[in-house]
Amino acid sequence: MRFAKIVFNVAGIYGILVLLPHYFMEAKIGHDHPPAITHPEFFYAFVSVGLAWQIAFLLIARDPVRYRLIMLPGIVEKWGFAASGITLLALGRVASSFAIPIASDFILGALFLWAFFKTPQERTP
């Protein structure tokens, strides 16, 4: 259970630190990685949903046994991003530097899966 607390706390804090600045970076991202963002509603929706998941990870960290089943969609969130990123990378649609966030999410997904199996289904007295 301690392992899950550490993993989900680290993931939640890391995710907030990475995603929160995006609210102020739309123009910079469009400039540094053209073309410019043409659908800001999708961009800000992605950031908002991502931040919501970081809060969920922090919630899981508070009580991994109680929130154990929420780890499963957390794995989907991490590995879904990694699978999409790997596909985009293989098709040459994103820069090779994108491999770093892909690898980060893949590793976090693996740690989430490990935490899921290490966390008991119910509290032991």
Image (spheres, rainbow, N blue to C red):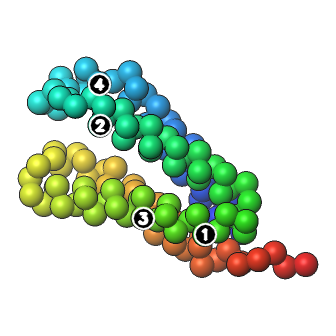
If you read the primary sequence from the N terminus, does the residue marked by circle 4 or circle 1 appear first?
A: 4
If you read the primary sequence from the N terminus, does the residue marked by circle 3 or circle 4 appear first?
A: 4
User: What's the CA distance linking mark 2 and mark 1?
Assistant: 28 Å
On the image, the x and y values in percent for residue 116 come to 59, 73
User: What's the CA distance linking mark 3 and mark 1?
Assistant: 12 Å
Which residue type does callout 2 highlight? Answer: Phe
Which residue type does callout 4 highlight? Answer: Glu
Which residue type does callout 3 highlight? Answer: Val
Q: Which residue is mark 1?
A: 69
Q: Which mark is residue 42?
A: 2
Under circle 2, the secondary element is helix
On the image, the x and y values in percent for residue 76 come to 42, 64
Q: Which residue is mark 3?
A: 76
User: What's the CA distance linking mark 2 and mark 4?
Assistant: 11 Å
Under circle 3, the secondary element is helix
Judged left or right of residue 67, residue 96 is: left
Snapshot quadrant of residue 38: top left
If you read the primary sequence from the N terminus, does the residue marked by circle 2 or circle 3 appear first?
A: 2
If you read the primary sequence from the N terminus, does the residue marked by circle 2 or circle 1 appear first?
A: 2
Count how many numbered circles sit on residues in the image. Answer: 4
Q: Which mark is residue 26?
A: 4
Under circle 4, the secondary element is helix
User: What's the CA distance linking mark 2 and mark 3?
Assistant: 20 Å
